[in-house]
Amino acid sequence: MTDPVQTPQAWLTEATRAARAAQAVLARLPAAARNAALEAAAAELRAASAEIVAANARDLAAFDAAGGSNAFRDRLALDAQRVEAMAAGLEAVARLPDPLDRVLAEWQRPNGLRISRVPMPIGVIGMIYESRPNVGADAAGLCLKAGSAVILRGGSDSFHSAAAIRAALGAGLAKAGVPEAAVQVPPTADRAYVGAMLEASGKIDLIIPRGGKGLVERVLAEARVPVLAHAEGLCHTYVHAAANPDMARRIVANAKMRRPGICGATETLLIDAAIAPSLLPVLVADLRALGCDFRADARACAIVPDLKAAFDSDFDTEWLDAILSVAVVDGVEQAIAHVRRHGSDHTDAIVTEDRDAAERFLGGIDSAVAMWNASTQFCDGGEFGFGAEIGIATGRIHARGPVGLEQLTTFRYVVRGSGQVRP
């Protein structure tokens, strides 16, 4: 559609113009037509599975040659099963209720005016993400269902994967009669496209970054477009004195080691001093068997002497790897204070059989997602029943937590009168 030798700014001007036109079509489509487009895109993803995996192999080869970490490699890697999960995710979004065709609130004024607040699409969304190529499919599905077009800029390490995924999505949209420009990706891995998107005021309506601290900080510092962002995933799991030990072992192992490279992975274990002497060695042994390393405070090291001592900065580090910070605390209030001091308002959990302690913890932290007796890795749009997510929001404007269909709409007012004029 556009010439790859163009400057990023020139490409983006054309791309957003086409996206705006495609979005105008999307906004008028009934839910059944948008759902049919998602189902067609899912079918094309399945049909192109081998091509997508082959494109991903090119990205993995370059990643390995550059000496990337295992945790980040897992985020980048695709196989037939993960392609199938992307396709199934699009179908799950298609089955969800329409976020647009509904009334949020309505009332009548004494003068007879009837006022309704109704959802509307955001418009053209710019998605900037790192490593995980499946994010592109999830984001496209959610944006399309919510009536918005999307410009997807994945990490340079996933360029070939992202291009192959977009080609399949575009083929599905075309078969369903939806303009392919509703989903676009830059034609090269040039990092200048990120800067062009951040400066695209009036062309892009919302930027959503999904990646590490460096990416999010850059977006927040440079964007001339509204941003829906999340901070680091400095997630905590607090094992309270009244925790069921077997439950705590299952939850902590899953929260840290199921996929240590995702933003919902627990980065710090807090454990009550009353149970630390008996339970902490068991938790450490469980996690070590799964390949985890540790950075522990003095009280934890006194209980398990071979733990590596933590620096203060370790408790402010999003490891995104098989490393866990550990601290011993004296009760709920000290756990809350630790989370408030070191956390990023992402996802934090308490494990306890004491309802009062749980409610004190849940009410005392300010996280976008607060959990009781569950793994922090449940902070996910799919697990919340959203079908998929475009990211996690930790700010205080518009949305918090997993961002799904409802969070990808804004609203307007429709006023129906019978000839009223204002005195």
Image (cartoon, rainbow, N blue to C red):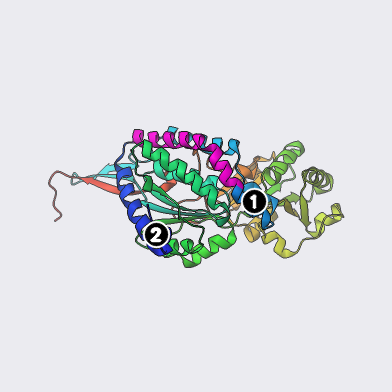
Can you tell which of label 1 and label 2 is closer to the viewer? 1
Kindly state the secondary structure of the residue where label 2 is placed: helix
Crowd band around label 2 with a 10 angstrom C-alpha radius: few (<14), some (14–19), many (20+): many
Residue at 85% x, 52% y: name it.
304
Farthest residue toward the bottom?
A: 221
Highlighted magenta segment, given as a residue range: 31-57
Most foreground residue, 301 or 68: 68
> How far separated are the C-alphas under marks 1 and 2?
29 Å
Residue at 75% x, 45% y: name it.
241
Secondary structure of the magenta portion, mostly? helix
Residue at 53% x, 65% y: name it.
218
Name the quadrant of the C terminus. bottom left
The residue labelled by disc 2 is: 12
Q: Give amino acid for label 1.
A: Ala
- 18 inside magenta stretch: no
Horizontal and vertical percent for residue 341?
64, 61
- 44 inside magenta stretch: yes
Does any portion of residue 163 appear in the rendered image?
yes
Most foreground residue, 306 or 63: 63
Q: Give amino acid for label 2.
A: Leu
Q: How many labels sit on residues? A: 2
Residue at 68% x, 44% y: name it.
255
* Labels 1 and 2 touching (C-beta < 8 A): no
Horizontal and vertical percent for residue 220?
49, 63
Sequence-wise, which precedes: disc 1 or disc 2?
A: 2
Most foreground residue, 293 or 10: 10
Most foreground residue, 284 or 80: 80
Does any portion of residue 385 appear in the rendered image?
no
The residue labelled by disc 1 is: 61
Horizontal and vertical percent for residue 54?
58, 43
